[in-house]
Image (spheres, rainbow, N blue to C red):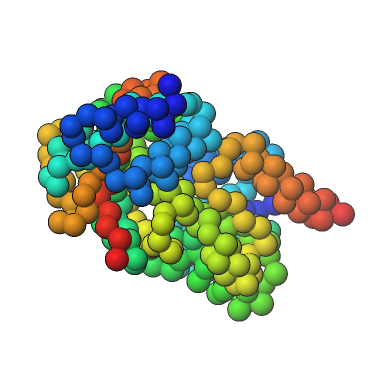
Amino acid sequence: MDNAVILSQQRTGREPAPNGDWVDPFCTAVTSVFDQMIGTPVALQRASSADQLAVLLDITAVIGFSGETTGLVALTLPHATALGVAEALLGERHSQFDEQVADALGELLNMIAGAAKAHLPTNRPSLGLPTVVTGANSTIAFPSKACPTQLQFQSAMGHFALYIGLERH
Amino acid sequence: MVRVLLVDDSGTMRAIIKRSLLLFGVDQISEAGDGRSAFAMFQSVPFDFVITDWNMPNMNGIELVRAIRQSGSAVPIMMITTEAERPRVVEAIQAGVSDYLVKPFSSQDLRSKVEKWITGLAAISAG
């Protein structure tokens, strides 16, 4: 089932539709980064609107946007998925979260955000440097006018989610 | 023997690029995590090839490229960055970048770029 079919089916439900400005660029970016940098496909499982205060998984990378598009994008992963992704990028296994795993996840999100921003419906937003935090069930607050969107993915390394809390000016 | 200066604030990206360099027999690799420390290294040690990211703390990649060119060096510089928009690429070329690779890239894309420069530089140093 392709991404368009999944989104079409979800939009027939009662929940608000995700922000279409962000879904395609970020879904394409996630797919491209995993395919090219990690060599594994990912499947979009669900695209939906998210709460202004989003609950996170074990490990989360966050990057800020500024310029005509402002806000935050967060990549949040369970511990096992994060270690699998880091191993694929670093070329070596890390049995627990450490500085190198954090760097790998930050760089992964940096590439996703960079690939997506070239296809956003605004001109040249700027990216900040990524930050990585740990702690399951912690929350992230998106800008009040952002109407956050959540994309849930499945990969060979496990599931993960991307929160997009951006607003256009 | 080709000496490479590899500049990226991400140790992960440096590790990925380093793996490709090692495949082509390049083992003289110096690493820096920002433009400022990279330029200090560049001024004290001769390099044959520079690979740099764009977005970094302290001095960014474009500022590093301009500093290297203003020093009078014609060393080949490849920029590897997420900045994919045409105006950004033009800005980089105008600053003096010799080659440009957009992240994300396949291992084949990276290897072919590295091979082009490393084999060319090795031939020059051997000749």
Q: In the shown orientation, is residue A46 left or right of residue B100?
A: left
Image quadrant where one finds the C terminus of chain B: bottom right
Farthest front residue?
A12
Question: Quadrant location of residue A67?
Answer: bottom left
Q: In the shown orientation, is residue A126 left or right of residue A150?
A: right
* Residue located 40% across and 38% down the image: A27
Measured as percent of width and height from the top left, residue B87 is found at 55, 67
Could you tell me if residue A96 is visible in this image?
Answer: no
* Residue located 69% across and 42% down the image: B112
Measured as percent of width and height from the top left, residue A49 is found at 22, 40
Q: Nearer the viewer, residue A12 or A40?
A: A12
Q: Is residue A2 above or below residue A20?
A: above
Q: Nearer the viewer, residue B40 or B52?
A: B52
Q: Is residue A86 above or below residue A126?
A: above
Q: Is residue B40 above or below residue A145?
A: below
Farthest right residue?
B127
Measured as percent of width and height from the top left, residue A109 is found at 37, 44
Could you tell me if residue B27 is visible in this image?
Answer: yes
Q: Is residue A36 above or below residue B34?
A: above
Q: Nearer the viewer, residue A108 or A50?
A: A50
Q: In the shown orientation, is residue A20 left or right of residue B82?
A: left
* Residue located 52% across and 29% down the image: A39
